[in-house]
Image: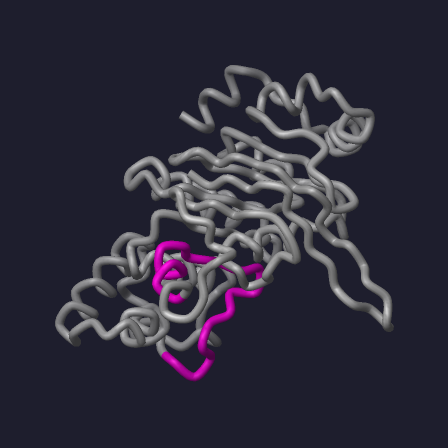
Amino acid sequence: MIMIKGLYKSFENEGQEVEVLKNVNLTIEDGDIFGIIGPSGAGKSTLIRCFNLLEKPNKGEIIVDGVNITKLNGKKLRDFRKNMGMIFQHFNLLQNSTVYKNIAFPLEISGYSKDFIEQRVLELLDMVNLKDKKDAYPSMLSGGQKQRVAIARALALNPKYILSDEATSALDPLTTRSISDLLKFFNKKYGITIILITHEMDVVKEICNKVAFINNGRIIEWGNTYDLLNFPKSIEIKQFVNENNFKIDKEELFKNVS
């Protein structure tokens, strides 16, 4: 479980402090696929990067499985991050390394044996249906294939959590669906909790059981996907839902997230 309590984050811009996150409070249960939505510049990416302290908050607590990770540093922080994989919009692959080496990288720097690494990488390549691309380089892959490599790399250390920062934004609709299905598969088969940032409404409707709406650095509302999208309490969310045709019926939600 992840609990965010009273989280604040600010950046300095031209000598002035700009508050990006303001008193954020969230609870994410084990096994959730938890979507975070909101307009551009709302603070979504900053928030998700706080989950693994790529961005360190100015104030507040991030409690993961009972541990306040804002107090961690050095080896303890590095060990914690092994349990939280991350995938990015632009894949962040090592361009001069093969698919195999990209997936092996987190295992190599964690000190695993060559035999274990080979077994794990081949297992992951099979899971993401890329065994035939083992020796290919990123430049030889499609966008969807690159993201599958990134997902396999994020799963290499058997994390309990996956953070997805606009992972499907650079992909066409068909490929987006295949990546969404892959994330849902890992969530259901292995119980991996997924927190995802997206501006793509179909992704949330297809795989998220819970969703939070953020605007101007504040969580306006959060809860189960059906209720928040169909019966929002705030004017901001009602407008956002209407503009994006973001309503969903119970049968569709059950079919997608079950």
Compared to 113, does 217 lie above or below? above
Left or right: 243 as drawn, with respect to 186? right
Residue lying at the far bottom of the rendered structure: 96
- Residue 245: image quadrant is top right
In this orientation, which residue lies closer to the viewer: 25 or 173? 25
- Residue 37: image quadrant is top right
Q: Position of residue 20 (x, y in %)?
A: 74, 53
Is 164 inside the magenta-drawn segment?
Answer: no
Of the 4 image quadrants, the one containing the N terminus is top left
Q: Position of residue 152 (x, y in %)?
A: 35, 59
Q: Position of residue 18 (x, y in %)?
A: 81, 59
In this orientation, which residue lies closer to the viewer: 158 or 229? 158
Compared to 209, does 102 lie above or below? below
Question: Which residue is pictured at 54% across the width and 46% down the height?
Answer: 196
Of the 4 image quadrants, the one containing the C terminus is top left
Question: Which residue is pictured at 80% across the width and 31% down the height?
Answer: 236
How many numbered circles does the render carry? 0
Residue lying at the far left of the rendered structure: 115
Compared to 241, does 49 lie above or below? below
Q: Position of residue 195 (x, y in %)?
A: 50, 44
Question: Which residue is pictured at 31% across the width and 61% down the height?
Answer: 156
Question: Which residue is pictured at 35% across the width and 47% down the height?
Answer: 160
Segment tinted magenta in the rendering: 78-97
In this orientation, which residue lies closer to the viewer: 112 or 13? 13
- Residue 46: image quadrant is bottom right
Compared to 7, does 229 lie above or below? above
Is 94 inside the magenta-drawn segment?
Answer: yes
